[in-house]
Amino acid sequence: MIQDILPHQYDVSFRHAEARAEDFVFIFQKGQALLRNEGGRPAVPTCGEVWARWPEMELTFLFSIDEANIFMAEAGELEPEGLTSHDTQIFRELDPPWLAFAGATASHLAVWRDKTRFCGRCAAVMKPSETERAMVCPACGNIVYPAIAPVVIVGVIDGERLLLTRYAGRVYRRPALVAGFVEIGETLEDAVRREVREEVGLELKNIRYYKSQPWAFSQSLLSGFFADLDGPADIRLDVSELSEGFWVNRDEVPDDEDLSNVSLTYEMIRTFRRLGPDGV
């Protein structure tokens, strides 16, 4: 998955670090990532390259991976000479993979910073904390930490069959699993039951945790579960959320190599195909 970058080591501990010319900087402008071109492929600019073009650009230290410090910058109305604008989904496929993970995480923090420019309590301009990863209001003391929304993903199993879905109203048409945000006051297990009941009208038993994944593209932390069908297998689709819901026999489950190392959804689908109901 996108966060699996071993042998590289991700260090998210809060600290202050001086930028070096060889360090990397992710530049964001109006929700887009600005990347340079390297042999026809997008690449991440270094601090040295940014300084050469825009010596006054303010760099914010985010975290480190191995010996490389990762910074973020906001381009504002700057003309991105020599850089190309990309949707942040580009980080699902950027090379090398450890920089793709860094870019996705940086985009998560960029969205949070953009949404916390002003205090939600008194409307004063917020400032970055000097002691922790947070935004602080200098007027009223309000503290806002990075937003991380909990999401459940559910692989519903009926013997040798797996339930797959397709989203409604989205360009994305690949098969997926039932998923949704955890509501206030819910446990993860309660959210699993509710989402499956709401989206496909099915009941569950034997809910078991599989794995988690930070998913920067929706500022979320995904928790994957497998669960067995409890009762009738007739799907009652919530058409406002899904365009399709269908059972697939294990030997017909998609085996998409291209996405297996990116998303928790596809790892779960492939794991069921490989191990079957007794292995998950």
Image (cartoon, grey):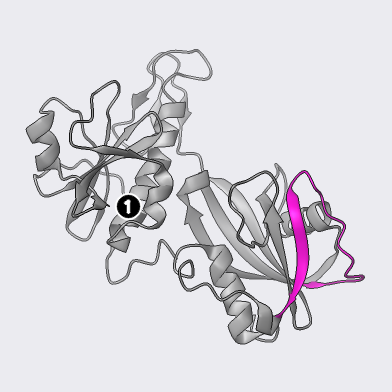
Residue shown at 48%/66% (left/top)?
A: 259
Residue linked to disc 1: 102
The 10 Å Cα crowd at callout 1, few under 14, some 14 to 19, many 20 or more, is: many
Q: Quadrant of the N terminus?
A: bottom left
Q: Quadrant of residue 280?
A: bottom right
Can residue 136 be seen here? The reply is yes
Locate residue 125 relative to residue 225 in the image: left or right: left
Magenta stretch containing residue 217, yes or no? no
Direction front: furthest residue: 40
Can residue 12 be seen here? The reply is no
Stretch of the chain drawn in magenta: 228-249
Whether 17 is drawn above or below 96: the answer is above
Residue shown at 42%/61% (left/top)?
A: 2
Q: Amino acid at mark 1?
A: Ala
Residue shown at 83%/54% (left/top)?
A: 237
Please provide percent x and percent y for residue 125.
Answer: 39, 16
